[in-house]
Amino acid sequence: MSIIVSLEDLELFREQLSDHPNALAALDVIEDCDGDLEDAAISLAIKSGQLPEENERWIDGLAKRWRHILCEAQIKEGLEDGLSGVLIDAIVAQTELPMRLAVPVAIYVVKTGVQPFCQPMQEKIFDA
């Protein structure tokens, strides 16, 4: 499932992250990739010194690796409200993700739906 970020969404995200130049640079890369979040994330990962081994669904795997943090109450609520500089700063502070990767990961979670993304965490909590 390829996620395409529309120009309208990119403009909204730019407004929400206007005080974060590195986040804006990540949004520029997404736009340069015609809104293809997967392609942009791989490009940003390479620029961050990472070498993604799989191109297919790489952003999905990256987001899932940090699901336990992304679905904590404070960050989850922030994602449900949309992107903000405070939210992206919190994701960067609590994960090993650089700003340029935290942005596409946050967009991925927002676009796939915060509740469905966090559902496996809820099931683990309630099954324990």
Image (cartoon, rainbow, N blue to C red):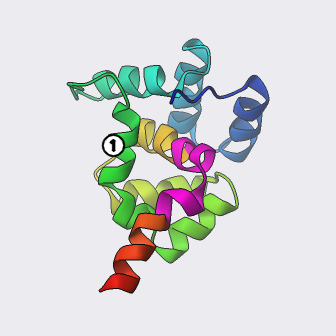
Q: Residue furthest right?
A: 8
- Residue 115 against residue 25 in the figure, above or below: below
Q: Decide: few, some or many residues near mark 1? Use Cα within 10 Å; few <14, some 14-19, many ≥20.
A: some
Position of 115 with respect to 51 (left or right) is right
Of the pair 22 and 34, the residue shown nearer to us: 34
Q: What residue is at 48 percent from the left and 64 percent from the top?
A: 118
In terms of image quadrants, where is residue 53?
A: top left
Give the answer, above or below, for where 54 lies relative to 64. Answer: above
Q: Main secondary structure of the magenta part?
A: helix
Question: Magenta segment, which residues?
Answer: 107-118
Q: Position of residue 99 (x, y in %)?
A: 43, 42
Q: Which residue is mark 1?
A: 62
x, y percent for residue 127 = 34, 83
Screen quadrant of the C terminus = bottom left
Label 1: state its secondary structure. helix
Residue ID at (52%, 20%)? 29
Type of the residue with mark 1: Leu
* Residue 79 vs residue 88, the one in the foreground: 79
Magenta stretch encompasses residue 13: no
Q: How many marks?
A: 1
Q: Image point 45% across, 20% down: which residue?
A: 39
Residue at the spot 74% in from the left edge and 34% down from the top edge:
9
Residue 47 drawn at (x, y percent): 32, 22
Q: Is residue 59 above or below residue 88?
A: above
Instruction: In this rendered view, identify the residue nearer to me: 37 or 86.
Output: 37
Give the percent coordinates (x, y) of residue 51: 21, 24
* Image position of 8 (left or right of 40): right
113 left or right, relative to 99: right
Occupied quadrant, residue 33: top right
